[in-house]
Amino acid sequence: MPGESPARCAPVPERVQERDLARTRRWIADAERSEAERLRCGQTRPPAPDWLIELGIGSGRAPVYVHVRGCRMAKNRPHPITDE
């Protein structure tokens, strides 16, 4: 019909495919943006502390263990400390 946009005159299957393509392009753009943000956050993360101290349970919370960076035993209640 005269005066209608070319997209409106397209057959239904073509319009469906164009809509699906636009949605896929949005998904790709969102995934790329998310990946870029994840990489940027990973680069700005501070380095892991050299030492961790694990505190006990209870109100006094006395130190129980001292761990080095990367120790697999430091799981429950580690807190970063300096070597000073």
Image: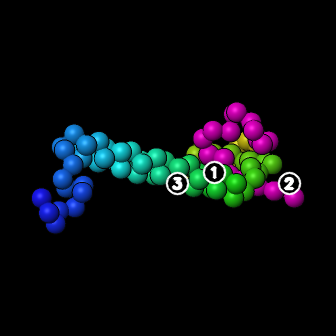
Q: Please name the residue that numbered disc 3 is placed on.
A: 33
Residue 59 is inside the magenta segment = no
Q: Nearer the viewer, residue 84 or 61?
A: 84
Magenta-drawn segment: 67-84
Mark earlier in primary sequence (1, 2): 1
Quadrant location of the C terminus in the rendered image:
bottom right
Mark earlier in primary sequence (3, 1): 3
Residue 9 visible in the shown view: yes
Residue 2, quarter of picture: bottom left
Q: Please name the residue that numbered disc 2 is placed on.
A: 83
Tell me if 53 is positioned left or right of 50 in this view: left
Location of residue 75 in the rendering, given as x and y in whole percent from the top left corner: 63, 38
Tell me if 78 is positioned left or right of 17 in this view: right
Q: Secondary structure at mark 1?
A: helix
Location of residue 11 in the rendering, given as x and y in whole percent from the top left corner: 19, 44
- The Cα–Cα distance between marks 3 and 2, rounded to whole angstroms, is 39 Å
Q: Residue furthest top?
A: 72
The mark closer to the camera, 3 or 2, is 3
Location of residue 8 in the rendering, given as x and y in whole percent from the top left corner: 19, 55
Category of crowding for the residue at label 1, using alpha-carbon neighbours closer than 10 angstroms: few (below 14), some (14–19), many (at least 20)? few
Q: Residue furthest bottom?
A: 3
Mark earlier in primary sequence (3, 2): 3
Q: Please name the residue that numbered disc 1 is placed on.
A: 39
